[in-house]
Amino acid sequence: MKRGSQESRQRRLLRLHHGPYTALTVRYGRRYLVDYPDDGAAWLVVGDALVSLARYEEAEQALAKAIEHWKPEKRRIPIMHMGHLFHEAGDHEQAAEWYRRAIEADPDDAGGYIYLGGMLAKQGRLYDAEEATRKAVTCTRGCIDEAYLNLGQILRARDRLAEAAECFREALRRDPDYREAHRALRDVELCIKLEAGG
């Protein structure tokens, strides 16, 4: 039996998801999906909650439903979440494949490149991470400030401090309140000063 409008139930599901109620999100979401099985966003929320609970097989099924029911022009969103699932499960090859699918779905959005580059960087594959992240900074949509921050972090790890500083400055030009970019810029500036004998 349906209780409340679809819209009010959607809002409640999102509030649960954004709060500390992971198990309740799954249970409420599943009840909601009995009544609205074509709601891709609800499948995504349930899938994300299942990932948080390390119930990866169930999460994969929910995210597959999210992809199936998502609008084609925005399908990169649930595809990226499938990448997150495999990343969390420790299957980096599958995660990379899903991030590449997200890039194929929308090559002008920075998100897929950012996640692919970040995962490669964590694996110590800095050259490949730099290559992916350089593509992110050329995108026309998405978190370009984050792409510049990530590129700067990769360049800093590769000991290319002046280039890293420029990336952090660009991130700050795009978002002057970006705390992480401020800290990273200060770090490389102090390193440059130390190397100059300061």
Image: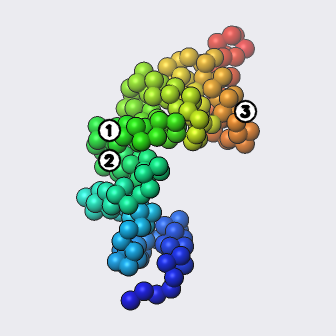
Q: Mark 3 near mark 2, Cβ–Cβ under 8 Å?
A: no
Q: Secondary structure at mark 2?
A: helix
Quarter-wise, where is residue 53 in the image? bottom left
Q: How many marks?
A: 3
The residue located at (59%, 31%) in the rendering is: 148
Q: Earlier in the sequence, mark 2 or mark 1?
A: 2
Rendered position, 138 above or below 160: below
Residue 15 is marked as none
Amino acid at pointer 2: Phe
Q: Secondary structure at mark 3?
A: helix
Residue that carries the numbered disc 3 in the rendered image: 173
The residue located at (60%, 23%) in the rendering is: 164
Q: Earlier in the sequence, mark 1 or mark 3?
A: 1
Residue that carries the numbered disc 1 in the rendered image: 97
Amino acid at pointer 1: Glu
Label 1: few (<14), some (14–19) or many (≥20) C-alpha neighbours in 10 Å: some
Q: Mark 2 near mark 1, Cβ–Cβ under 8 Å?
A: yes
Q: Where is residue 113 drawn, in percent x and y?
A: 46, 35
Horizontal side of residue 46 vs 17, given as left or right: left
Residue 86 is marked as 2
Q: Where is residue 173 drawn, in percent x and y?
A: 72, 33
Residue 9 visible in rendering: no
